[in-house]
Amino acid sequence: MTPVYYLLGMFAKLCHELGRVRANGFPGHWLVLIVAPATILLIASDVELRDRQSCGKPPVSASVADVLRHGGWDNRYVRLSGLRDTPAQLASHGNSDDVYIPVVDPKSNVAVMVDFEKPPYPAVGPVHCVGMLRPIPPVLQEALSGVAFRLGKDSIDDSVYLTAGETPANPAWFGILTGVCAPVMLLAIVVLGMRNIVFQPIPAVRRRDTATPPDSSTPLDLRLSGRLVLGKVPRRFLAVPTAGAHLDDGTLTFASTVDASSTYTGIGVDSFTSAWRLIPKPGTLQRVARGYQYLGVRRRPALMFRYVPADSRTGRSETAILTCGSEEQLDRVEPAFEIAAGAAA
C-alpha cells in the first residue's frame, strides 16, 4: 500500500501548488485536474466515438442520389459517386486552402459539396470520392447560401458534405484518453476529499525504555497541517512550519508564522502576515494515531490528533497532523504530546 500513499502524496502536492493559483476566481487545481480532463473526455467522446460504426470497415458505395434520398448518412465512410458537370468551385472562407466542389445527381441537378484539402482536383466528368460524410457546420451553411444559382445548380444539399480523403476516427484513442484522464480526475477528487492531507497510520508499537534519554539538543523540525486561525479568520494550511507552546491552563497550542496574503493582478487584496494559531478548547485534545504524512515524493513521521477549536460555536471537532523531521524527533515530541492530551482528557 505504500506506493499508493506516495502517489496520493504527489497529487496532494500538485493540488496544493495549483490551488494557490486562480483563474477568474476558479482554483487552479480544479481547472487543471478536473475540469480540463472532463472537457477532453467530453470532446473526445464526440470526435472519437462518432465513427465507431465505420471504423475498420471498407467505405460504403453510395451515389449522390442515395445520399439525397435517404437520411442518416452523417459520419459515414463512403465512396461517393456523382458528376462534376462544371469547372466552378468554391474557395474556403477560412484560413485553410480547402476547395469545395459540387458533385451532382444528374437527374435532380442537386449537388453535394465535396471538400478537397489539396490538389489534384477531379476533372469535369464522373467523380468517385472516398471520405467521410459530415454534417455541414453553420459557417459553411452560411457560405453556401446563394451559391447554388452561381454554380448553376438547382440546389445544394445543406445537411451533409464529404471531406475527401478523411478516414474514420479510431475509438481506441478514446480508450487511451480515458485511461489517462479518468485516473487523474479520480486521484484529484480523492485527494481533495482528504483536503490534501495524506496520512498513513501505523500499528501502535510500544516504545522500548532506554537508559539514554532522547537527544534534546537538535532543534525540532515541526510541520503542521490543519485549520489555523488569525484573529477571527480561519484558513487551512498544509505542512507549514510550527512551534508548540502551553497556555496557562496547560492546553497545548501551536503557532505558525505564514504569509497568507492575497493578490489580484499583482495588487494586494488583503494582508494576513502574522502568527496563525491552532488553539483547542480545554479538555478536547485527543491523540488519534501515529504514522506518516505523504507530500510530494517525501514522507514524514507524523501524529494525528483531534480537537475542538476554541472559536468553534458548534462544538464540531477538527483533525490536524503534526510531523517531525525524523522518527527520533517524533519520539521526543510524542510523550509531551500524550501528557498534554491526557491532561486535557
Image (cartoon, rainbow, N blue to C red):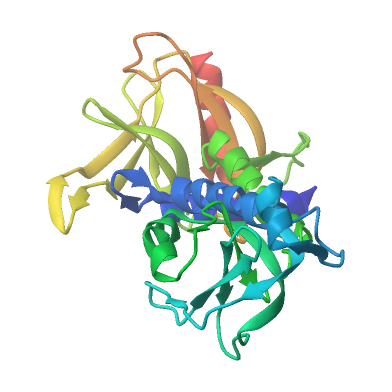
For residue 199, which quarter of the picture?
top right
Q: Residue 203 or 114: which is nearer the viewer?
A: 114
* 129 displayed left or right of 244: right
Q: Is residue 126 above or below residue 299?
A: below
Relative image position of residue 323 (x, y in whole percent): 54, 46
As drawn, the residue found furthest toward the top would be 314
The quadrant holding residue 83 is bottom right
- Whether residue 335 is visible, yes or no, is no
Residue at image x 69%, y 55%? Answer: 67
The residue lying toward the viewer, choosing from 83 and 94, is: 83
Q: Return the residue found at the far bottom.
A: 120
Residue 272 at x, y percent in the picture: 20, 43
Q: Is residue 45 visible?
A: yes
Write the residue at 46% across / 42% down: 224
In this view of the protein, which residue sits in the foreground, 256 or 7? 7
Q: Is residue 274 above or below residue 338?
A: below
Residue 230 drawn at (x, y percent):
25, 33
Give the mark count: 0
Looking at the image, the residue that sits furthest to the right is 57
* Quarter of the figure with the C terminus: top right
**Residue 114 in the image, given as x and y percentages of width and height:** 58, 70
Residue drawn at 81 percent across, 61 percent down: 55
118 to the left or right of 150: right
- Going by the image, does 214 lie left or right of 209? left
